[in-house]
């Protein structure tokens, strides 16, 4: 089985060709970073136009790299939401057009399910597993019990963790996108223990997260330093922020592990995914936690943590091989929670 995947939900335009033998035959990603940098964040209208401009060329490139024609495909999968709706429409319409023209099945993939199932593309991960999904718009702990079967243990009550990285980077004057820049600054820190930050939710019952207070604490330290930060100040603050986030994530995960093991005494892996899972300090902290609880730890390779179309093609394969596909009148969804009885999402789309 060979599937074309399309991702256009945020500021990456991406196309990929993946097989059910877990072979990534092509995986092309075009970042719109330069288009959005002047505005310090993603501008939805600019994103939608850029997807429209580049998607056809990227699909042609992916198909050429895979060495196949549209006639060789078994299905076309595209992100159907959640995300910036203009971009999602571009990807969904393109996938539908290919499907209609070639008589192929169309699979509308939940972007979050793409992140959630990536570990099964890159590693031998069986259901059930405990997933920490940490991305630009989400921060959730979920038991992944099967394709389309998610049970949420906790979520953020304010900012998503990637959003917290991005906002912290902005207020430290590091630029956009924040995650990788905070990680680089933290690695340069000479005195990483210099600043003490509050650890939101640490030790509290439940598995929810909160990050807005942390960001405010960073701002307060920055203001106390007189506004104009030296490079050393900036690096030390970035290090404090990153290690605090890692510690809070590990604390919440430890609680979720207990709940997961009650429900699934046979065990399962601890999986981390989403853009923030590209952070090496966070990966290391979670790996230690998994060791302590004798759970296998799985984190996808860095480039498959941030947005890509290989994960969309793969989630399409997972659904399609269970006999699932979508009608050509599928309507793109700006919001689309993974678990059926989720509380309304807070923060960005989703
Ligand atoms: P969602 O998946 O929730 O819809 P998104 O698709 O915009 O949101 P992703 O592409 O999965 O998010 O992740 C992007 C986020 O990951 C950004 O907030 C970015 O700052 C963060 N990020 C990327 N690399 C790193 C890193 N090395 N360390 C920390 N954060 C990172
Ligand atoms: Mg992005
Ligand atoms: Fe994402």
Image (cartoon, rainbow, N blue to C red):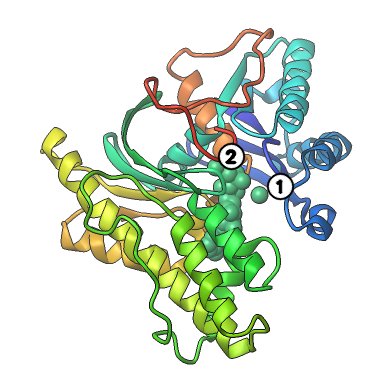
Label 2 belongs to which residue? Answer: 348
Residue 191 lies, in percent from the top left, at: 45, 90
Residue 285 lies, in percent from the top left, at: 33, 67
For the N terminus, which image quadrant? top right
For ligand 2, tell me if the residue under mark 1 lies within 8 Å.
Answer: no
What residue is shown at x 68% (from left), y 9% (from top)?
328
Q: Camera-side residue: 16 or 172? A: 172
Element type at mark 1: strand
Label 1 belongs to which residue? Answer: 28
What residue is shown at x 14% (from left), y 41% (from top)?
261
- The quadrant holding residue 250 is bottom left
Residue 23 lies, in percent from the top left, at: 53, 42
Element type at mark 2: loop
- The quadrant holding residue 162 is bottom right
Mark 2 vs mark 1, foreground winner is 2
For ligand 1, tell me if the residue under mark 2 lies within 8 Å.
Answer: yes
For the C terminus, which image quadrant? top right
Q: Camera-side residue: 158 or 251? A: 158
């Amino acid at each position: 089985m060979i599937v074309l995947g399309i991702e256009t939900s945020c500021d990456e335009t991406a196309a990929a060709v993946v097989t059910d033998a877990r072979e990534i035959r092509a995986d092309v990603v075009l970042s719109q970073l330069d288009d959005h940098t002047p505005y310090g964040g993603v501008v939805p209208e600019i994103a939608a136009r850029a997807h429209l401009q580049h998607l056809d060329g990227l699909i042609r490139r992916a198909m050429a790299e895979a060495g196949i024609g549209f006639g060789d495909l078994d299905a076309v999968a595209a992100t159907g939401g959640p995300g910036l709706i203009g971009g999602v429409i571009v990807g969904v319409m393109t996938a539908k057009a290919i499907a209609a023209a070639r008589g192929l099945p169309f699979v509308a993939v939940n972007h979050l399910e793409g992140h959630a199932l990536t570990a099964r593309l890159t590693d031998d991960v069986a259901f059930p597993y405990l997933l920490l999904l940490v991305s630009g718009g989400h921060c959730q702990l979920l038991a992944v019990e099967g394709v389309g079967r998610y049970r949420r243990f906790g979520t953020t009550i304010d900012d998503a963790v990637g959003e917290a990285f991005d906002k912290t980077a902005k207020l430290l004057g590091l630029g956009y996108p924040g995650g990788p820049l905070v990680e680089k600054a933290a690695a340069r820190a000479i005195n990483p223990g210099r600043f003490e930050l509050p650890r939101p939710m640490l030790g509290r019952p439940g598995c929810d997260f909160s990050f807005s207070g942390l960001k405010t604490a960073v701002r307060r330290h920055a203001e106390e330093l007189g506004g104009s930060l030296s490079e050393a100040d900036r690096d030390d603050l970035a290090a404090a922020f990153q290690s605090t986030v890692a510690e809070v994530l590990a604390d919440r995960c430890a609680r979720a592990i207990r709940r997961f093991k009650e429900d699934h005494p046979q065990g399962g892996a601890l999986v981390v995914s989403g853009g923030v899972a590209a952070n090496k300090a966070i990966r290391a902290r979670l790996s230690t936690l998994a060791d302590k609880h004798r759970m296998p730890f799985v984190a996808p390779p860095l480039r498959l943590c941030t947005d890509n179309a290989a994960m969309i093609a793969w989630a399409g394969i997972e659904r399609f091989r269970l006999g699932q596909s979508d009608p050509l009148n599928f309507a793109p969804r700006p919001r689309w929670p993974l678990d059926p009885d989720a509380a309304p999402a807070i923060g960005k789309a989703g």
